[in-house]
Image (spheres, grey):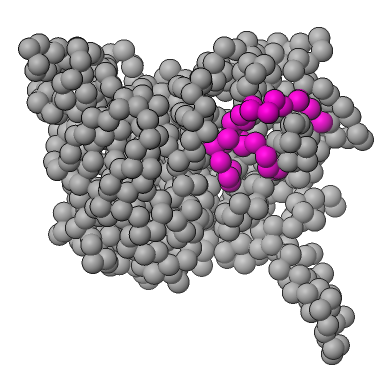
Amino acid sequence: MIRRYDFGQPIQTGAIANPVPACTDEMPRFTVTRSGESITYTVRLGEDDLIFGLGENVRGINKRGHIYRAWNSDDFSHTENKSSLYASHNLVLFSGATGVFGAYFDDPGEVFFDLGYTSGDTASITSVNGNLTVYVLEGDTLIGLVKEFRHLIGQSYVPPKWGLGYIQSRWGYSSDEELRKVVREHRDRRIPLDMMSMDIDYMEAYKDFTWNHNNFPDLPGLIAELKADHIRVVPIIDAGIKEEVGDPAYDEGVEKDYFCKKADGELFVGAVWPGRAVFPDFLKEDVRKWFGGLYRPLLEAGVEAFWNDMNEPALFYSTEGLEEAFRKADALRGQNLDIHTAFALKDAFNNMANSMDDYRRFYHEVDGKLVRHDKVHNLYGAMMTKASAQGMKDFAPEKRHLLFSRASFVGAHRDGGVWQGDNSSWWGHILMNLKQMPSLNMVGFLYAGADLGGFSCNTTEDLLQRWLQLGVFTPLMRNHSADGTRVQEIYRFRNWEAMRDTLTVRYALIPYLYSEVMKAAVKNDMMFRPLAFDYPRDDEACRTEDQILLGDGCMIAPVYEQNARGRHVYLPEDMLLVRFRTWADYDLVPMKKGHHWVKLAMNEFPLFIRRGHVIPLARTAQYVEAIDASQLTLLGWLDKGTAITLYDDDGVSAQFDLNAGLTVIDVQVRDGKAAAKAEGRTVDASRIVIG
């Protein structure tokens, strides 16, 4: 059951796709108090209560014990003391002695979630603006709550099938020949690859919707050449438009009054990669339509995918903030700087980026009224995604588009995916990648993943190897790194063949992974789940944070510690360990419920299949379109027969029918042997363990 409660004058965020009527009775579960403009919603916590949700954020799957802030933040240092990252996904779910319930706080401004930090027995959620809608969810199970919420917010975006292929990316690919060389290395060494991602280096002076004709003299030709080798090019687009008379996007935006302004009516000018920049008012429908149309020349050049960045929006400084910093510096010039004044000088410049003062300096037009940016800050990236998606749909309405973004809000899950931002080459960030996957699924983001190997800092070959082993299972699988860091394409490393072997498993699993994405989208389900969702009465399972369920039949448990040659695993039921080395080289080890130490050499990684389930494995391939899903090997542990449903389609059509694309694979066990059949497919059941 979902109940809606309106407070103040809520701003329509676009998060809700299937509205429910507002209630006038007292809000259940929460105590509501007001203080000035802000509103706080408080609920008492039992000693063993668990709290889930908040999508992309730091710390555990269980969010209890910390303060979180809904405020889309450009912050590349993803450490535990942070309270927000690039997205605001304001869903919290409670599970404990009083049952399961939750709430979604549909507020585009700043919201604080004190989930047992100030007082261990109390959760307090505070809307700073006090203008919002709260949806209270009550039900019998956590997965039931998620399904109801997902129906409320609408069907998740689904990528084209080739979007599940491996992406190689780097900030620093500065010429067409460099892209060609990276592709050649992959193809010559038979390292699977489907996409090359281009960062800001391809642009002319870092201006959106341009390319550097010196370094990329024939971008359409390059795109066609790579497409002939089954490689798609994925360019980056940023939110800020360079302030430059003569730039078509700037000139037209100024002429048509499409950019955000200050209170005095002057353009708000901040700075990003090209220097001084202006920012489209994405909250206006006509601006979104215009901005989406700016993608057309690149689409006409053959681009089929984009990634949107810097759309929190990120600000290096504003013109006002820069002047204020110089004034502070001039006032300190010539002084003997002590501990206070020295840090004041540093702070004058360090605090210019993404300043709250700047976010209060400009305005949006919402329903004909001016609204200060900080009141709707968390919508900006989602509305950019909406604009981009519409532009791609208008260009090719019959095809699915590939689009993923850094900043997001609930609602953007209908238009694109997300990558988990500018992480670091730290072992702990493998674990953070894992923990964010179910939380993102709760709020509708299925096409998601992290920068494998880490974006900032210098990766190591063992770190990249172990991170790729997790990336095998995430729908978005991209190796991406920052300019100035160690180059981390697979072929650069001594053990590149072991990394290649890991990728062969990914491509063998794509028919299964694609099926799970599609079914989760259509059924408002989760592809990744915390163990607590399936084993709510198993306290050890409920408090396990480094293992998650995949689909109905699997569990993943990556190695995320340096120099480890194995890991501890808790099995909440009997499972079959598949210890992969390559797509065709793996061990099958039946394991009983309980605690186990699983040995895993550096080139080995586990997949656990729940007893009574099977999963399909195809022959691997060098790119997605070459995968032959008509010949499958089944892996599993059965006592008797079972049936699985596998979804497949052409992988690109915008319209799809889940029922029409389902294949039932029937498995029968007789006389200690398994046999399987499926219409239109050859199915090998010889790798099914009987017992």
Could you tell me which residue is drawn at 13 percent across and 41 percent down? Answer: 584
Residue 106: % across, % down? 69, 28
Q: Left or right: 247 with respect to 360? A: left
Q: Is residue 379 above or below residue 249?
A: above
Q: Could you say which is closer to the camera, residue 586 or residue 187?
A: 586
Could you tell me which residue is drawn at 42 percent across and 19 percent down? Answer: 522
Residue 534: % across, % down? 45, 22
Main SS of residues in magenta: loop
Magenta span includes 46:
yes
Magenta span includes 87:
no
Q: Left or right: 608 with respect to 632? A: right
Q: Left or right: 323 with respect to 670? A: right
Please state the extent of the stretch shown in magenta in the rendering: 40-69
Could you tell me which residue is drawn at 54 percent across and 20 percent down? Answer: 142
Decide if residue 312 is in sight here. no
What is the quadrant of the N terminus in the image? top right
Count of numbered labels shown in the rendering: 0
Decide if residue 40 is in sight here. yes
Could you tell me which residue is drawn at 75 percent across and 45 percent down? Answer: 373
Q: Is residue 292 above or below residue 484?
A: above
Residue 594: % across, % down? 37, 30
Q: Could you say which is closer to the camera, residue 509 or residue 675?
A: 675
What is the quadrant of the C terminus in the image? top left
Q: Is residue 276 above or below residue 471?
A: below
Q: Quadrant of residue 386?
A: top right
Residue 473: % across, % down? 34, 39
